[in-house]
Amino acid sequence: MIRAIARYGIRTIPGDEKEIVAAFRRGEAIEGPAIREYEEQFANYHCVSYATATSFGRMAFYYLLRALDITPHSEIIFPALTFWVVPEIARCAGFKPVFVDVDAHTFNLNPALIEAAITDRTRAIIPTHLYGQPCEMDQIMQIAEKHDLTVIEDCAQAAGARYRGRRVGTFGNASFFSFQMLKGINTYGGGMALTNDSSVAANVRSQAEAEPLQTSGELVRRFISGLAARSLVSPKGFAWWGYPFGAAASLVTDHDFSKHFWERIRALERFPNSYRRQYSNVQAILGLRALAKLDEFNQRSRANAQTYSDVLMNCRAIETPRLIANAEHVFYQYCIYVSDPARAKRRAIRRGIDFETSHVDVCSSLPLFKEFAANCPHADKTAEALQLPVYSRLRTSDIERVLKTVMEVTSDLAPMSEPETAPRPEEFKSSIVV
């Protein structure tokens, strides 16, 4: 059978399942010492004073919004390209999202456009380190200091990334992380709030610990669904369902059916019960194991990305990712522009390789935020970007096969037009050889 390669991979460590079962047997699945240990080690890893584990990364953000001294009903600046639930959480907390365009080639908030969006009601900026690439935090922090704005970093996709030698999540007043299955640290859900402010940390902790504990049944369902998802995106699992379905669908449509597996975009007038839960001890056990491997996993993803860029940067039908200076990208995703993305992805899935368009939302154009709509043409352009599989679990032979497929499916495509901003990215180096 063909070894099909999904665009997503789930990070796990051999023995995770045994640790889960052992925690249940000890009676330490729900509550236990691992939670506080994980918080302390996560804070130490980032050289930050306080970390608080939460049910979701989005809830860490919600607690931070309520804990920080941000004037009610004020405006908060978001990149137009971000996961819809983050600005929606801000709206639920009583704030007005204001969307600012991104750089279409780095996919991150464009610092040059921030000041034009600042009004006398602006109180905060939420830079999102998208796809694992740090934002240009020097410029963002200078703007924040000039206008006395709070900065909360969205590090959901960038655990372990660095900017000027410092890990993301350590520049602003606070930051939040996600441990959802596809993230850099996978604890089958959960999140973390970071800050150096003791009063903010105490407030966040009081909110998080006021939520109900998860039940054993909820935890069992969490892990069963997680293990099922892991099987579905494995090469064998994807070969049985994703590849044949995708290949057949490509004959009649360019629609990305994976969008239907993501959480439905909707107004959160009332938070789902799953949001209102405490982080569990068994998840913290997995978090400790994953944190110890985070740098190694990130090095593998960077090495895979380096291999792609070395081969593809001279391909005229492709534009490879642009990297900002003084940053260490961790490549949660590797996104390219292709002169004919629809044709490229159709051809690729028929060869068993899953290329697709981004699953991150252009929030400035979503009906959910129609009252906050903004003209953000560069964010709109990112909808054309294709994601290549780059995750750390890929074999060297998988990377070679992905590259071979990319070259085949783009060999007769027209050259890309010149990028709107120059120059092309400087090369980045990795200590891992593949």
Image (tube, helix red, strand yellow):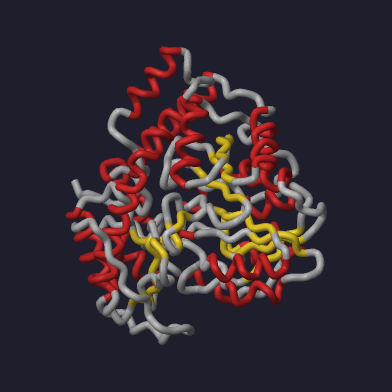
At 57% from the left and 45% from the top, the residue drawn is 194
Residue 215 is left or right of residue 162, and the answer is: right
Q: Position of residue 21 (x, y in %)?
A: 38, 19
Is there any visible trace of residue 379 in the rendered image?
no
At 55% from the left and 59% from the top, the residue drawn is 128
Residue 291 is left or right of residue 393, and the answer is: right
Residue 426 is left or right of residue 258, and the answer is: left
Q: Pick whichever, 316 or 301, lies toward us.
A: 301
Quadrant of the image containing the C terminus: bottom left
At 69% from the left and 40% from the top, the residue drawn is 199
Which residue reaches farthest bottom? 418
Residue 421 is left or right of residue 49, and the answer is: left
Specify the quadrant of the image occupied by residue 231.
Answer: top left
Specify the quadrant of the image occupied by residue 116.
Answer: bottom right
Q: Position of residue 185 (x, y in %)?
A: 42, 42
Q: Position of residue 33 (x, y in %)?
A: 49, 22
